[in-house]
Amino acid sequence: MAEEFVTALKPLIDAIGATVVPLDDRADTDLVLDWEGKPAIAIRLDFEDTLSGIIAAAEQELGKQFGDLDRTEKQAAVRLLDGRGAFVLRRSIDEVAEAMGVSRITIYNYLNAIREAT
């Protein structure tokens, strides 16, 4: 029965960049999914790929690489990333700053301005 469960969830698992992990190999950070009241599979999220995907989608939406954006466009990109939850991921500030060619402080300043405005 658990195979049906995995088959049904496979498109979602692939879309979020996760992998199925055998229950015996699961880590504390893995998400255990139940099937008919019993643990069936564990899902491991790859947050590095998740952030890369969020950045790539934002660059495509904006039509430019982050490094090619002007100041106003970078602020809009940070707003977009913040709205998509990118900054809850570990080291996301550093990665976004590097992609934009700015300092971490600049990203924090953009975020503070965005959050104060709302």
Image: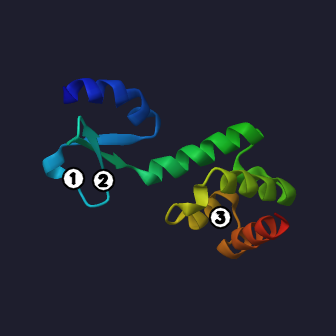
Secondary structure state at the residue bearing disc 3 = helix
- The answer to whether 2 appears left or right of 46 in the picture is left
Residue 29 lies, with reference to residue 36, above or below; the image says: below
First along the sequence among labels 3 and 2 = 2
Task: Mark 3 vs mark 1: give the one in front.
Answer: 1
Spatial separation of the CA atoms under disc 3 and disc 2:
28 Å
Say what amino acid the circle numbered 3 marks.
Answer: Ala
Q: Which residue is mark 1?
A: 26
Residue that badge 2 annotates: 30
Q: Position of residue 86 (x, y in %)?
A: 59, 55
Q: Residue at x 78, y 57 (%)?
A: 74
User: Does residue 24 appear left or right of residue 19 in this picture?
Assistant: left
The local secondary structure at tag 1 comes to loop
Image marks 3 and 1: residues in contact by CB distance under 8 Å? no
What quarter of the picture does the C terminus occupy?
A: bottom right
How packed mark 1 is, by other alpha carbons closer than 10 Å (few <14, some 14-19, many 20 or more), is: some
| Residue drawn at the location 69% of the way across and 59% of the way down | 100
Q: Give the CA distance from mark 3 to mark 1.
A: 33 Å
Viewer-proximal residue, 66 or 19? 19
C-alpha distance separating marks 2 and 1: 6 Å
Q: Quadrant of residue 85?
A: bottom right
Q: Which residue is mark 3?
A: 97
- The answer to which quarter of the image holds residue 35 is top left
Residue found at the far front of this picture: 37
